[in-house]
Amino acid sequence: MITVDMVASNSPNQSLVSAITADSSDDWESNVAAVEQLAETLGSTLGPKGMDKMIVTSDGKLIVTNDGASVLERLDVEHPAAKLVADVASQQEAKAGDGTTSAILLAGALLTEARSLAEKGVHPTKITEGFQIAASLTKEGLADRTVSIDVQDDEQLADVARTVVTGKWDEAGREFLADRAVRAVRAIQRDNRVGFEKITRKTIPGGSFTDSDVIDGLVIDMAESSADVLTPDERLPAAFENATVAVIDEEISVDKPTGMGATSPDSYDDVEALRDYEDQTLQRFVDHIEEVGADVVFSQQSIDKAVVYQLAKAGILAVERVRRDEIHKLARATGAEPVLTRELSPATTGTAASVELRQIGNTDVTVVSGDTSADHVTLVFRGGTEHVLEETKQKVDDCLHVLKLAIEDQQLLPGGGASEVSLAQQLRRDAPAYSGREQLAIESFASALEVVPHTLASSAGMDPIDAIVELRTAHSDTAATAGLDVTNKTVADMASLGVLEPLHLKRQAITSAADAATMIVRIDDTLSVTGGEDDGHDHDDHDHGPGGLEHSTEGYPWAVGHSMGHDH
């Protein structure tokens, strides 16, 4: 008996999440049922008319989302089989950036088919052999069903982005987010390559999500900097054109004696001598920065107020406590080398087309625009609540991932269930070539593939059986791009409607689902062991996040060598 209870999570975010549990038997049937429960939980979020999930955290915070990856991240999955499938499906987000829900749905459907085969007497090894054959045939067949687009056409790229966010926002919101995603990718695209290290994400509360924008340059939040320190006579200029930029990788201040060696002045002259020493040391910092011709100084650590003051008098902007990932981005965007103050020289400085002080909402920021060979853009997300900010960021993330795949691979598949139905029919034609019982598993794999159009039809209020029959009929007439137009509740040409998704995304979803299902099928018992033995997994020597990217407090400070690569 599988149950879904609301329990307090022990995870770091302390969310009140759904816990998928099972009875104590932990047998093969229990494993399948647990995965089916997980698929059912996520399935209703799929499609343009997918429903939202409300998650209530332990501190009363509400999270409303219909993004499968977001829901899966917050689920406290207790059943080992369901947890295994959830972990495998999470790699879908890491490898392709989207398609988590589809991967979970397909895994659940495959296990449902596997149970049916087992009841007919087909051994699990034959089931897994058939599934592996079918998965291989399916992935090979995907390449024959691609459609071509002009990746230089912004409208066609926008179609790809709209496919990602359809059902997540209303029509106006969908158009807005697709436009922002295409603008961001276009700004950093070079020779049909998209380097995500050139994108920074910032969340600034306040305003509407439609105030979110793409800003040319690296946006640095000034909330904790000292850039607002002014000269006694006049303000610093609001913008520095063709600025020389220095990046300091240390604290700019006078060392304060501590501990046993603390200085204890004995007289007023000693105090004055110490003050003179401090003033001279700070002035040397200022003089040195002026000598190298810097217009703007960024420091990863603090800058003494006196130095900021003197630099401001000289017309030099000083920005302190810049995040480490932003220091790396500044170096790439301007060509400056992060160095110690004593190592600063004209050779280690960089240049920026402009450094501008702005205000976004109530937040002061500095916008650094590099030269044309080192373009950088910042996606600034606005919203009245933290939830709106996070949901907007999540959706634009998904758009960026699929746009990168579309531009770099230039291989897209028709959506709306078209690829799944076409591949299912191909598997049914190929299955008789196999004489063993794996033939039955191949046919079952074909039936499982149709779970995607079945779910889409159900979500749109269509009769799923009639929709599948109509799709099969259309594909029998070689209409390989025929899929479900859920808006008009009919079968239509997905290519002409612009409902397209990257080949890599679909291939990875099938791979993830097949891998998860075959692992579960071969498990006949679950054993509980005690002890803290090493699980054989090196937790430190690898990256986490989409495409091997590292996450940080703001998105895409995956600054350290991240290019959002993917497997082919």
Image (cartoon, rainbow, N blue to C red):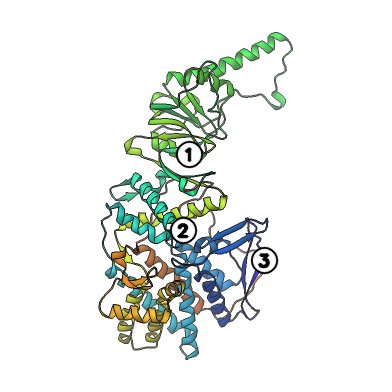
Amino acid type indicated by mark 2:
Trp
User: Counting other residues with Cα less than 10 Å from the Cα at mark 1, is it few (<14), some (14-19), or many (20 or more)?
Assistant: some
SS for callout 1: helix
Find residue 373 and report its image quarter. Answer: top left
Q: Which residue is mark 3?
A: 7
Label total for image: 3
Q: Which residue is mark 2?
A: 169
Q: Quadrant of the C terminus?
A: bottom left
Residue 287 shows which numbered tag?
Answer: none
Q: Residue 548 in the image: state x and y as whole percent.
A: 45, 54
User: Counting other residues with Cα less than 10 Å from the Cα at mark 3, is it few (<14), some (14-19), or many (20 or more)?
Assistant: some
Q: Which residue is mark 1?
A: 326
**Of marks 3 and 2, which one's residue comes earlier in the chain?**
3
Mark 1 vs mark 2: give the one in front.
Answer: 2
Mark 1 vs mark 3: give the one in front.
Answer: 3
State the CA–CA distance, disc 1 to disc 2: 31 Å
**Of marks 1 and 2, which one's residue comes earlier in the chain?**
2
